[in-house]
Every structure is written in structure tokens, then in C-alpha cells.
Image: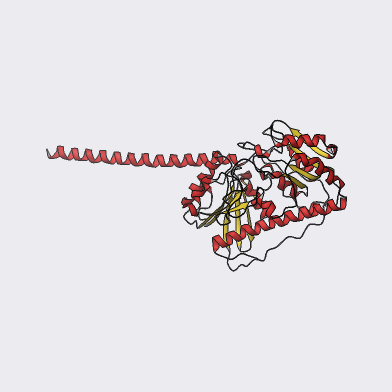
Amino acid sequence: MRITFRKVACAILTSYLIVSCYTGYILVRNRLLRESYEVQKLQKISALDDEDWNPWGEEFESEQSEVPHHEPPKILWNLEPHKPEFKVKVNRSREMIVEIWGKAAIGLYLWEHVLEGPLEKKLGGVWSYGTKTVSNITFRFRTGPGVIPVKVPRETENLVLVLNGREPSKVEYAQLWLNSLPNFPHLKNVAVVLLGNEKCVNDWIKPYTEKGGGQVKFVFLVYDSPDIDNRTFFQWPLGVATYRDFPVVDSSQIQSNKQRKYLCNFLGTVYKNASREDLLRNLESSPYKSRCYIKPRYEWVPLERAESREEYVQTVAQSDLTLNPVGQNTECYRIYEALSLGSVPVIEDVMTPGICGKSPASNVYPLRLLKEFKAPVIYIKNWNDLPNMLETEKSLNHSYIARRRKNVLLWYESFKSKLRDRFVNVIRERFFNLGYMQ
């Protein structure tokens, strides 16, 4: 009887151990599967970051899965002496490091155009990396499909995430990044640069802010959001279309005194019942039609050739005026692309559908940043006024046009410099409790 009881006890204990081990195996396997799924999901969604080139209707573009990188087109003008590099005096008594992880194309505008940081491709473009010190802060920029939560430095203390929140699929990906932040044990400070929704519907980000109980101290937000308060939300410009390789333009290369080939230009998709129909009708009936480069298209095409990229840049670079009808939002890439090339943007100054508008920080809208920084642009409320505007433009002498072009280039350089100062100063104050640099 004693032997039988011992056998039964051993059998029960053995069964218990087997069940316990198997349960542990199942739990570990499921956890690994979940982690593997999250990584695969991130890698799959990260392919959505790059968008196809389309100079015809960028405000209406559907975002594609993956596109090859193209070399920026070379702009055809003679070189002038290079402007001296602006150097910031650095106090090295206390060096601080801020990581910038670019998971939206506007990250390249921040890094290459505003901060003027270098960028080196690694592993065939899977990673791109650069570092630059401004004031006392060393910024380290990382971008590319290889930048995913499980492949970035876990020791990061100070972080700026560049995210896309234009549409639900992009918001889902942005939330995956924000939800991963608790996995970084040393993280002290987090900020976000966000390509917002074109209708200014961005409530999804609020629970991630400190005010909403999250980790994000502040957000630099694109478009005229009613949330701009210069405390939690700061406004950021849309900038140029870096996703389609619009180049970093050295303004010293532009001969501001040289007469340009075109009075104005319009390359774009013309949508039915949109104001672009009015623009085109007035251009077609203008006596100055032959002086303008007009190339409409009536159906959006997702892919463009390298030749059309080059054609677009060259046309803007050779135009006195660049016409900017509204799209899903009043603000569009073409405005900043024209400014960078010394072509005066003619902007349709009307509000688009949505909740964009006045905010606690400003009653100015639309195009709050451009108006507050007194951008040298031409605003137009109705494209029926275009013929008279072109008539006035044609009467201007070349000396005036050359001075105006120089002022446009100088203003845009100053604008980027002020953006850089604002970005760095907010980080100095909110990340490191330092005063604004002068």
C-alpha cells in the first residue's frame, strides 16, 4: 500500500511539473509571437513613410507603400560666391544630447532645411544618420525604414519624434511609436513634430501629452490648428516636399538680377468644381497666357517620372510668380518651394473645410505663420482677380522685380533661421530648464 501511494504521489508531481513547464512554454511562445507581430507590423507600416513624387496635386495625394529614392534635380543657373556659413557660439560647459527620430517626411525638412544638419545613408538607405550641435545641444537625427522601436538606442534620455497624423493609417503607426515610449527606461523628455490632419482634427494626440496624462511635453504641429497655445502646441510649417526629393537650395546660387523666362507658372491637377478651374479659366483668357508656363492635368496619377520632377523645379526656378490654389488645406508645399527658389507665391487666401482657424495664441488665419512672419507673398481671394494682377505685374520694371526676388530669398533664409531658434529655444527651456538663447 505504501508503494502504491508513493507511485501515485510521484505521478501527480510529475504531471504537475509537466503541466507547469508546458504552461510556461505557451506563455513565453505567445509573448514572443506578439513581439514578433508588433515588429513585423511596424516594419510593414514603416514602408508607408515614403510617398510618390507628384507635382500635380500634392495636397490630394494618396500615400503609397514604397518608392525608390531619387537624386535631387540640378538647378540650371550660374554659381555666385558661396555665402559664409553661419556659426553659433557654443558653450561647451554642459553638453546635452537630443535624439530626433524621423518617421515622417517633414523630419527631413526639419533636419536638412531648418537645422541644416548633414545626413549619411547607412545599409543602403535602411538607416540615415546625422549629428549637429546647436547652442549647447547635440542633435542626433535618425530616419529610414530601419528606424523602429526595437532598433533605436534604448539609453535615449531626450527625444523628438517626427510623426505623420494626416490620415487614420498614419495615426495608427504614430500611436505604435508613442505607445512604445514606456519601454525606454532612461527617457526623461519627449516632444513631437507632427504633420497634422489637413482639417486640423488632431484630438488623438492629446492623451499622449503631459496635459492629457502622457509623456509628451510639447508638440510642433503643422497647419492652423485651434490647439496652438505656445505651451503644449506650437505651430510648424509644412515646408517643402522632401518625400519627393525637392532639393536643399543654396540661395547664393540664384542670380536674383537675371531676368526669368516665365511671368508665372501653374502645374497641377484640376479637380471638378474646385477653385483650380477658376484659376485655369482666367489664365487661359489672359493676354499674358503665353508668358506663363501652364500645364494642367485633369486626372491624378500616382507616379511621376524623374523628368517631371526636374520640369517642376526648373519651371518654378525660372518664374517670377508661382500660383498656389488651395487643396485640402490652404497651406501647401508649393508655397515654400517657390520661396526657396525666389519665385513669389500667389496664394489663394481662403479657409478650407475643417476646424482650422483661430487659436488661444493667435486670431490670424489662414496661413498664420506666413502672415505673422510677414512673408513677401501675394494673397488673392478670388482667381477672377488674376488678370488684373498679371497686368500690374507686367508693368513692373526689372529693377524692382530683381530687388523683390532678393528680398524673397533673404526672407526665406531668415524664416528658417527663426524657426531653428524657436525649435532650439523651446527644447532648451522645456527639456533642460535653460533660458532662451539670444
Marks counted in the figure total 0
The spot of residue 316 in percent (x, y) is 77, 44
The spot of residue 188 in percent (x, y) is 50, 58
Q: Quadrant of the N terminus?
A: top left
Residue found 30% across the figure and 41% down from its top = 20
Camera-side residue: 271 or 80? 271
Residue at the limit of the structure toward the left, as seen here: 1
Snapshot quadrant of residue 272: top right
Q: Is residue 178 left or right of residue 412?
A: left
Q: Is residue 248 left or right of residue 29?
A: right
Q: From where the camera sits, is residue 246 visible?
A: no
Residue found 73% across the figure and 55% down from its top = 413
The spot of residue 134 in percent (x, y) is 64, 61
The spot of residue 58 in percent (x, y) is 68, 39
Residue found 69% across the figure and 52% down from its top = 371
Colour setup of the view: secondary structure
Q: From where the camera sits, is residue 421 visible?
A: yes
Q: Is residue 361 left or right of residue 39?
A: right
Residue found 58% across the figure and 64% down from its top = 95
Answer above or below: position of 302 versus 233. above
Camera-side residue: 337 or 314? 337
Q: Quadrant of the C terminus?
A: bottom right
Camera-side residue: 33 or 263? 263
Q: Is residue 294 left or right of residue 136?
A: right
